Amino acid sequence: MSTEKVPDTPVEVIVDLLTKAQDIAASCGNVPEELTSHLQKALDIASGLDDYLEKMTTQESEQLAELFKKTFSHDWDQVHKEGKTMFKLPKECITGHVEGQTLKMLIHMSQAKRVLEIGMFTGYGALSMAEALPEDGCLVACELEPYLKEFAQPIFDKSPHGKKINVKTGNAMETLKELATAGEQFDMVFIDADKNNYINYYKFIMDNNMLRLRGVICIDNSLFKARVYLNETTDSNGLALREFNQFVSNDPRVEQVIVPLRDGLTLIRRVPPAAECFRHQCKITDDEVFRGVTGRFILDRMRLDGKVAYVTGAGQGIGRAFAHALGEAGAKVAVVDLDGAKAETVVEELFLKGINAISITADISKSDDVQRMIDAIVSKWGVIHIGCNNAGINMNSASEDTSLEEWDKTFNVNLRGTFMCCQAAGRVMLKQGYGKIINTASMASLIVPHPQKQLSYNTSKAGVVKLTQTLGTEWADRGVHVNCISPGIVDTPLIHSESLRPLVQRWLSDIPAGRLAQVTDLQAAVVYLASDASDYMTGHNLVIEGGQSLW
Ligand SMILES: C[S@@+](CC[C@H](N)C(=O)[O-])C[C@H]1O[C@@H](n2cnc3c(N)ncnc32)[C@H](O)[C@@H]1O
């Protein structure tokens, strides 16, 4: 049996042909030296490419390496002879390292959560993609041969990402029908099974709306060893791929590109709905509801790309969660805290996530500090779009014992400090004609939380709500929106203190949601209020307390 490698990609075909040409040249005595040298150079370029791509691509995981090794050392002819597989499976059809990493990258970039693979083989592509999926992501892999599920599953089980993979054995078209009946949709579909059915898989997915908004279809082997464009092609798979490529390029529902990676990888995405609507001249209403406000759908309208934000009290707790949320949504963030070291640590966290941030040490109860904070942000970034006035303190005492010192201290930070921040940021924002201020109030502005006694806190936070309502109405027609968030009891280290811990059970019985708030429960609200999606909202107190204020 010949062990000679069959060329599988256009580059491998070129290498093969150049090698043959070089052999012929070597056997002829009178070949000009220049031609021999050009041949050698062309061969060096073509034969070095795949190795170089391999070397320069991020190393595969241990489990992928094991899958690759196990696939190549397996005797596929033998298992077929033993009747364990319906077809003789060529190990070369494995997706492999560079393409696996490409698929992984596409999943990261498109933030896909649900993936469909048609043609799993030993699961290299499936596991590569699963590695890029979020923890709650899922990949449905269709595979004709039950033997391959048995082959891949033990390695999937060793991987922390294997549980995201659900292998469905049987004819892929039957699986597709089941998935469509169940209303399943996918962010990414990787078609890599029987070539003559590519067109049927593609049509079925498109016609049955199985591709989610912004979904991508990836097609493997779309160059099929260059046979898709060589005139003399008679090979049925090459012809099937040629027909498929032509069909996609004529399909007005999509736009596509063939990436000449390995044997060709086509990326296909649906064109925006407005263009689709125009094409159909359909009766739908082509307005902002349909096409999105300024062409942006709702989640995009909550993005904060290019925005500049600050968060006070951002060294820990709610403020830290706000800083992360605003940064994740695209804003640059000034992390402000009384404790400069804590602010700096949050900046480091943000930096690790690719978020642009600076730390500012400031005591917001001091007007000089507040102005210095605003000046620092403007001098660094030129503008302030979002101001989160979150810093606050809480001291407990029975009202008859509350000292003026406690009252003043609480009000100086919670109300006077918040006002000074609103005013200083507001002056910048009014000049810009744009701004979003989000103050942290409290459920204590609405109800009297008990049994702990916290008069100063409750009244200062009620003041924050009135401050928000007043500024929110006064500045709304000049583009500055002011809202506040009133969290319920938030699960921070503070409430686990000696004095408060015994109260947790009592509080829980007052909360319909049955649990305390986590700081992450508040993140979406701050992003919404900071974004253009909330442009019609001002002076509002957004209460997030698991229903506690209603009981
Ligand atoms: C090129 S290999 C897939 C490689 C795989 N994507 C990877 O990451 O290594 C093609 C696979 O498609 C499967 N296949 C072929 N026809 C199929 C069908 N009608 N339904 C489901 N799977 C099919 C084959 O058994 C084979 O395992």
Image (spheres, rainbow, N blue to C red):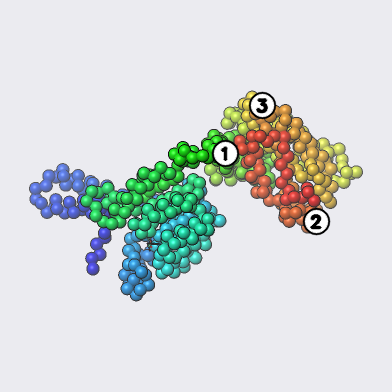
Q: Quadrant of ligand 1?
A: bottom left
**Res 289 label:** 1
In this view, the residue farthest toward the left is: 30
Front residue of 83/34: it is 83
Q: Against 213, is 158 above or below?
A: below
Between disc 3 and disc 1, whose residue precedes?
Answer: 1
Distance between the alpha carbons at the discs numbered 3 and 1:
26 Å
Q: Against 401, is 152 above or below?
A: below
Assign a secondary structure to mark 2: helix
Distance between the alpha carbons at the discs numbered 3 and 2:
45 Å
For the residue marked with disc 1, what is the amino acid? Answer: Val
Asked whether residue 436 is in view, the answer is: yes
In the picture of the structure, the residue carrying the numbered disc 2 is 506
* Label 3 close to label 1 by CB (< 8 Å): no
* Label 3 close to label 2 by CB (< 8 Å): no
Assign a secondary structure to mark 3: helix
Between disc 3 and disc 2, whose residue precedes?
Answer: 3
In this view, the residue farthest toward the top is: 431
Q: Position of residue 342 (x, y in %)?
A: 65, 44
Q: Against 475, is 159 above or below?
A: below
- In the image: residue 432, left or right of residue 236: right
